[in-house]
Amino acid sequence: MTYLKPPDAAARLPRRGFLKKLGAIVGAAYATGAGGLSALGAELVRMPFAHGERRLARFPQKRPLLLLRSWPPLLETPMSVFDRGVFTPNDAFYVRWHLGHIPTDIDVPKFRLRIHGHVKKPVELTLDEIQREFKAVELAAVNQCSGNSRGFFEPRVPGGEWGNGAMGNALWTGVKLADLLNRAGIKTGAVQVRFNGMDSGNVAATPDFMKSLSVDHAMDGEVMAAYGMNRAALPFLNGFPLRLVVPGWYATYWVKMLNDIEVLDHPDDNFWMKSAYLIPDTPGANIKPGESAKMVPINRMEPRSFITNLTDGAAVRAGSSTEVRGIAFGGDTGLAKVMFSADAGKTWHPAHLDEDHGKYSFRRWSARFDPVNPGAYTLMSKAVNANGVAQPMQPNWNPGGFMRNVVESVRVRAA
């Protein structure tokens, strides 16, 4: 495959373009407080949970997205986007950053990826060298925030109150992480590989955002360093010029603006591995409020499915057939099937699955809904992955608001 060169416009965004637009957006929010968010978008969207009012905001390289926080940006993809195709467009892909200082002007020829630590030969690679000297690979994979759907947690928990749109599916182009690590040569005794990006805190005391994988995971041939997204350069806000892709794992590991890889000969005890993004070590990361449990770093995703062409309150015609469409994914493995119910889960029928783009990708599904009589109906979909893991009928709960994957429902009325 021919290596993908970033377009000039994406490779070096001018300060008077990208920075000026970004500054105007952030300034409007901070200067006028919450009421000033009207400057970011006129349309108000109400999410189906408490305090779910969101405005649509336009950031550089993005269409209007649901605004959770102006800076560092939290932008959610509207659910309607997922009905339009299996791959989420780059300009509609959700955005989640942790730290307040994000580079907004990158000189690509000066960019270097440093690989060091417990290696035989530390190396530094330019983006051009990564694209020319290593075999390019492509992989379709879902990127999903650990806290996707946190707004639905009851009792409520602190953190970004996402709806269901803190996720996206893309065709990622890049190189195998294993190939990069082999260039440096991992020494015997290596335990983990730690990843760091170009973002940083606004104050020195802020822990640098770093995540780690076991050496075996890092070398499995699936983890990637990606420079392309849906066969275009990565958008700035999604990690340009290079980001880690960890298929089947939550997006906290998908480090953006990746510029530093360190091989460790000891377990990583940095803040973001030891103290943040922890889940109960229980089935489904589920505990009761007030309970305690052993906590471990979040890791593999669970299967999920959604109805995308109908929303709560939609009207359909009694006595005729309606197509119900949606998306689903298997989490950390392939999707085996999607089951559809038109009677609130009393009975289930297999849905039709569209083209398979790989075990880590969204997959579109469809089913026929034939309401004979007028009245209210509750539609549900349930994903089952290749390991036999199915979405649960009851939601999980944990204090981080992580890993929600309950069977979703849409209430419609036939008339």
Image (cartoon, rainbow, N blue to C red):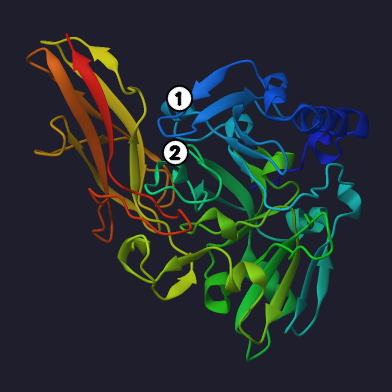
Indicate whether 396 appears above or below 231: below
CA neighbours of label 1 inside 10 A, class few (<14), some (14 to 19), many (20+): few
Indicate whether 136 appears above or below 377: below
- Mark 1, secondary structure of its residue: helix
Q: Residue furthest bottom?
A: 189
The amino acid type, in three-letter code, at marker 2 is Asn
- Judging depth in this view, the residue of 410 and 232 nearest the camera is 410
The amino acid type, in three-letter code, at marker 1 is Ser
Locate residue 355, reporting x and y percent.
Answer: 36, 37
Residue 249 horizontal side relative to residue 63, left or right: left
- Pointer 2 and pointer 1: residues touching (CB < 8 Å)? no
- Give the residue pinned by disc 2: 164
Residue at 48% of width from left, 37% of height from top? 165
Residue 411 horizontal side relative to residue 242, left or right: left
Locate residue 119, reporting x and y percent.
Answer: 74, 83
- Mark 2, secondary structure of its residue: loop
Residue at 33% of width from left, 63% of height from top? 287
Locate residue 39, reporting x and y percent.
Answer: 72, 20
Residue at 86% of width from left, 34% of height from top? 19
C-alpha distance separating marks 2 and 1: 11 Å
Indicate whether 238 appears above or below 111: above
- Give the residue pinned by disc 1: 80
